[in-house]
Structures are given as C-alpha cells and as structure tokens.
Image (cartoon, grey):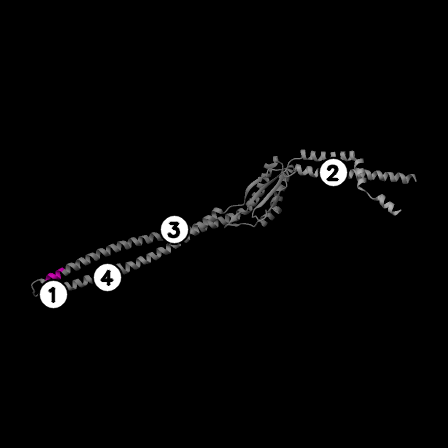
Amino acid sequence: MLQSQVREEEISLVDIWLVLVKHRKRMGWVFTIVMTAVLAFAAFSPRLYQYTTVIEIARVDDKLLENPETVLTKLQRSYIPYVQMQVKQESPREWIDIEARIPKKSTLVVLESKATEAEKPHVQALHERVIGLLGADHEDEITAARLHLQAQLHQAQDQMAGLNDKENLLQAQERRLEKKEAMLNEQLERIRAAISEARKTKLRISEGVPGESWPLAMILVDSEIQKYLEREQLLQEELQIDLARERAEIANERAALVRARARQEEVIRELQMKLGIMQGTRAVSTAISPGEPASPRPLLLITIGFLVAVVAALIAAFFVEFMGKVRIKAKGEGSQ
C-alpha cells in the first residue's frame, strides 16, 4: 500500500513532458508576452551612457596638495551633495546622480554619471561645478605656495646678481693687475737701462785719466748702480711674488665664484621648475563617454529576458497543472 502511494507521488520525466505538451499553448503565450515586454523595454527605454570626468589634484613642490582619499571624502560628503542640493532647488527634473571613485593604483579621482546623450551638457555643467568647488578649496593653499616660491626665486635671483657683481669686480681686479704688471715692467726696463748706462759711465771713468775726482766719481757711480740694483730686485719680487699671489687669490675667488654660480643656477632652475609644474586642481577630461551605452544593453537584456520567459512559461505550465489537480481532488472529496 505504502509503495504504491510512493510510486504515485513520484514525478517521472514522461509526466513532465506530458505536462509541458498539455500546456504548450499557454506556455507559448506566457513566453511571447514576457519576450514582447522585454523587447519593448529594450527598444523604447532611453540609452544611458556612462560619462566620466577625470580630476587631477593640485601639486605643490611636485607633491599632491591632498591625498586622493581625502579629496574623495570631500567630494562624497560635501561637494557632490551640495551641488545636487542646488540642482534640486533650481530644477528638480534635471536630477542626475554623481559618483566619485579612485581608480586602482592611481592618484586621480573620477566623477561618473549615467545620463542620456541629450543630457551630456548638463552632466558637464554638474561635474564642472563640483570641480570648481574643489579647486576653490585648494586655491588659497596654491596661491600661498606660489607666493612663497616666487619670493624664494627673487631671493635666489638677487643672490645671482650679487655673484655677477662679484664677477665684474674680479674682472676689474684682473685689469688692474694687468695695468700694474705693465707699469712694473716699464719701470723695470727703465731701471735696467739706467743700470746699463751707469755701468758704461763707470767703465768710461775707469778707462779715463786718473785725477783727484776719480775715486769719488767711482764711489758715486757704484752707489747709484747699487740703488738701481736694489730697485730692480724689488720690482722683480713684486712682479714674481706679489702679483703672482694676487693672481692666485683672484683665481681661487673665481673658482669659488664659478661653483657658487653653478649652485645658484641650479637653485633658480629648481624653483622655476616648481613654479612651472605647480597647478591647481583641474579636470583632465570632462564628461567623456566610451561610446557604448551603459544601460540598457540590448543583447544582455534579450538574453536575460529569454531566460526569464522560459522560466515563466515553465512555472505557468506547472502552476496550471497543479491547480487543476487541486480542483479535481477537491471535487472528489466533496462528492464523498
């Protein structure tokens, strides 16, 4: 008795097939209605595109003014809600959702909105308003940093001007040494000519007829020659020692000046580079769409609709069959 009841309650594949064949028309209607609804939705629903705006965060000294996570928090909790509140007050029908995120392993921040192609200008305006608020928040710090760098640059340029003045001073000292050397050489030539003339005089006196004045004349000539020789020695020392020392000092100062100017030029280039790369928070691209609709996607929608239609048709067939058996059993129990 129990085994027979179990066999009666078992559903075989043949029974399933018979149920499907029995209710094939009803299944066809359900499948057709569902697919028609899906196709109508795919055909007449507006195409939504994913519009993306990439934000580049302001940089100071080649470093981000704020880290991307802080900027993202400000966007999500402050700027985006504020702009959307303004839009809702101005024109409630033009509400468009804005989402912010940080791409993986990136220092950029991205704004994203789904909208129709006709709404693209509105999306651009919304994204620009959000970026404008963020940029204004960063502008005070950017301005202060720019003024600080400009002050440093002016100071470095003034120091370079001082080094250039020192270069002019060294050149003037070199010209003075050249004139001094020429003057000393000229004096040395005159001294040597005087020594030569005095020696000739001494020779003429020694070859002349001796007289009472001869010894005195020789003493005077020797004294004059000695004075000239001492003067010649002083001039040679000044040429070979003093002038050489001054030239060495100037050479050392020039070498130190060259190094100082090279360092100062590097400082100026670095400051100019920092000023050049300093930029405010800006949009790299505004409301760019990849071209393909983000939703609905017809092929995906039709595929899902087909599966839903098949499942709905099967459920309808088995539900009708179940309700039929319930009615039959209810009638049987009622007749008893």
Foreground mark, 1 or 2, reads 2
Give how far across and how far down residue 160 sits, in percent. 40, 51
Q: What residue type is disc 2 on? A: Val
Dot 3: within a 10 Å radius of its alpha carbon, few (fewer than 14), some, or many (20 or more) residues?
few
Quote the CA–CA distance across marks 3 and 4.
40 Å
Image coordinates of residue 270 in percent, x first then y, are 45, 50
Q: CA distance from mark 3 to mark 2?
A: 86 Å
Q: Are marks 1 and 2 in contact (CB under 8 Å)?
A: no
Identified at 85% across, 39% down, the residue is 325
Which mark is first along the chain, 1 or 4?
1
Which callout, 3 or 4, points to the residue nearer the camera? 4
The residue nearer to you, when weighing 109 against 308, is 308
Q: Is residue 270 above or below residue 324?
A: below
Give the CA separation, mark 4 to mark 1.
27 Å
Name the mark nearer the viewer: 4 or 1. Answer: 4
Looking at the rendered structure, the kind of residue marked 3 is: Ala
Q: Earlier in the sequence, mark 3 or mark 4?
A: 3
Give the alpha-carbon distance from disc 1 to disc 3, as whole Å.
65 Å
Relative to residue 37, is residue 144 drawn left or right?
Answer: left
Secondary element under disc 1, as helix, strand or loop, is helix
Residue 256 versus residue 56 in the image, above or below: below
For residue 163, which numbered disc appears in the image? none
- Residue 168 located left or right of residue 85: left
Report if residue 131 lies within the magenta region.
no
Q: Residue at x 69, y 34 (%)?
A: 39
- Measure the C-alpha gap from mark 1 to mark 2: 148 Å
Say which label, 3 or 2, has the lower sequence index.
3
Of the numbered discs in the image, which one, if any, rests on residue 161?
3
Question: Which marked residue is nearer to the observer: mark 2 or mark 4?
Answer: 2
At label 1, which amino acid type do we have?
A: Leu
Q: State the mark number for residue 234.
A: 4
